[in-house]
C-alpha cells in the first residue's frame, strides 16, 4: 500500500506556478529520491507533503499521507500527523534546533511528546535513557558531553546527527531528508549517508531523499523522480535512470556529475 500519494500537486505564489502538477507515489518501506537543480521545486514539494508551505503560497491537487489528505487539512489535523507519520531533516540542522537549549534536552522534549501522545508517559530517567539510546543510534560520540552542549558548540555533522536523532524520536513512518548532506564536507557527507541508510534499514522507515546531487541520491534510494522547473520530467528505478536516462535534462544532470567527478579525479 502506498504511504504517500502525491497527485497533480501544484503550488502557486502570486500567480506564479512554482510546482506544476507533480505526481508520484511512495510505498511503505520504499526509498525514493527527488533530484533536480536548485530552484526546481523539490523543497516546496516536501513542504506541501507535511503541510508546511511558506506563507503566501497556495497548493492544489492532492497529497495523501498514511490515509490522510494534507491539502486543505486543518492545523490541528496536521499537528497530529507531523512527526508521528512524517519527520523531516533539513539541509541546515540549525533550523531544527533551538540555539538556547542544550541538545540533550531538545531530543528529550521530542521523546517526551512522542511517548505522551502514544499514551506512554515517560519519567525523567526513562527520557534520559531514551535520549542516550538515540544519541548512540546516530553514532554521536561522548553522549554525556554532547547532551550538555548547545548547538553552536557542535560541528555541522554532529548537529545534523542531533537533528536526525530528533526526527527518529518521533518514530516516523516516513523520513523526509531534504539535502541533509549538502552543507557538510565530503567526508562527513559520506558518513551521514551511511548513517541514514543504516537507520532506514534498521527501523524499516520509508525514505524520501531530496538532493540536487545525483550521485548522492543514487547511493541510498531505489527509485528517483527528476524535477525541473517545478515539474517531473522523468521517473524510474535508479539504475535505469542512470544507465539510460530518457529526458535530455536527466542526461545533462548525469553529464554534469561525471564532469565534476573527472575534475575531482584530476585534481
Ligand atoms: N516562499 C516563497 N515565495 C515565493 N517563491 C518561492 C518561495 N519559496 C520558494 N520559492 C520559489 O519556488 C521555486 C522552487 O523553490 P524550492 O522548492 O525551494 O526549490 P529547490 O528545493 O528545488 O531548490 C524557486 O523558484 C523559488 O525561488
Ligand atoms: Mg531545496
Image (cartoon, rainbow, N blue to C red):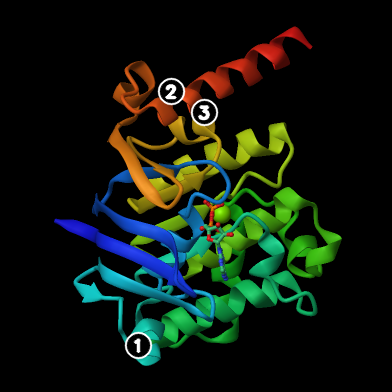
Q: Position of residue 207 (x, y in %)?
A: 38, 50
Residue at 30%, 76% (x, y): give it.
Answer: 70
Disc nearer the start of the sequence (2/1): 1
Residue shown at 65%/38% (left/top)? 189
Quarter of the image for the C terminus: give it.
top right
Asked if residue 60 lies left or right of residue 197, the reply is left
Residue 128 pos. (x, y %) = 61, 74
Label 1 vs label 3, nearer the camera: 3
Q: From the image, tell me which residue sits under label 1.
A: 119
Mark in front: 2 vs 3: 2
| Residue 251's disc number | 2
Count of marks placed on residues: 3
Q: Which mark is residue 108?
A: none
Q: Quadrant of the N terminus?
A: bottom left
Helix, strand or loop at mark 2: helix
For the residue carrying disc 3, how many other residues have a C-alpha within 10 Å: few (<14), some (14-19), or many (20+)? some
Q: 19 or 88: nearer the eye?
A: 19
Q: Earlier in the sequence, mark 2 or mark 3?
A: 3
Which residue is farthest left? 1
**Which label was assigned to residue 215?**
3
Q: Would residue 212 be seen by someone viewing this image from the given angle?
A: yes
Q: Are marks 2 and 3 in contact (CB under 8 Å)?
A: no
Amino acid at each position: 500500500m502506498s504511504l504517500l500519494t502525491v497527485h497533480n500537486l501544484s503550488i502557486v505564489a502570486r500567480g506564479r506556478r512554482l510546482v506544476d502538477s507533480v505526481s508520484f507515489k511512495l510505498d511503505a518501506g520504499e526509498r525514493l529520491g527527488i533530484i533536480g537543480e536548485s530552484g526546481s521545486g523539490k523543497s516546496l514539494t516536501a513542504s506541501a507533503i507535511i503541510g508546511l508551505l511558506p506563507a503566501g503560497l497556495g497548493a492544489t491537487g492532492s497529497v495523501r499521507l498514511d490515509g490522510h489528505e494534507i491539502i486543505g487539512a486543518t492545523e490541528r489535523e496536521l499537528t497530529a500527523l507531523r512527526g508521528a507519520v512524517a519527520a523531516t531533516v533539513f539541509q541546515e540542522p540549525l533550523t531544527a534546533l533551538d540555539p538556547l537549549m542544550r541538545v540533550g534536552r531538545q531530543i528529550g522534549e521530542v521523546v517526551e511528546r512522542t511517548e505522551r501522545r502514544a499514551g506512554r508517559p515517560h519519567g525523567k530517567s526513562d527520557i534520559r535513557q531514551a535520549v542516550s539510546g538515540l544519541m548512540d543510534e546516530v553514532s554521536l560520540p561522548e553522549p554525556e558531553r554532547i547532551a550538555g552542549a548547545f548547538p553552536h558548540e557542535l560541528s555541522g555533522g554532529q548537529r545534523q546527527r542531533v537533528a536526525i536523532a530528533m526526527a527518529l524520536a518521533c518514530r516516523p513512518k516516513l523520513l523526509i531528508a531534504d539535502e541533509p548532506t549538502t552543507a557538510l564536507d565530503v567526508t562527513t557527507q559520506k558518513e551521514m549517508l551511511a548513517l541514514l541508510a543504516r537507520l532506514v534499514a534498521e527501523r524499516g522507515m520509508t525514505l524520501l531523499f531530496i538532493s540536487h546531487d545525483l550521485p548522492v541520491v543514487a547511493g541510498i534510494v531505489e527509485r528517483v523522480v527528476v524535477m525541473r522547473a517545478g515539474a517531473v520530467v522523468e521517473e524510474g528505478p535508479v539504475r535505469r535512470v542512470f544507465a539510460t536516462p530518457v529526458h535530455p535534462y536527466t542526461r545533462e544532470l548525469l553529464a554534469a556529475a561525471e564532469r565534476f567527478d573527472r575534475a575531482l579525479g584530476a585534481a
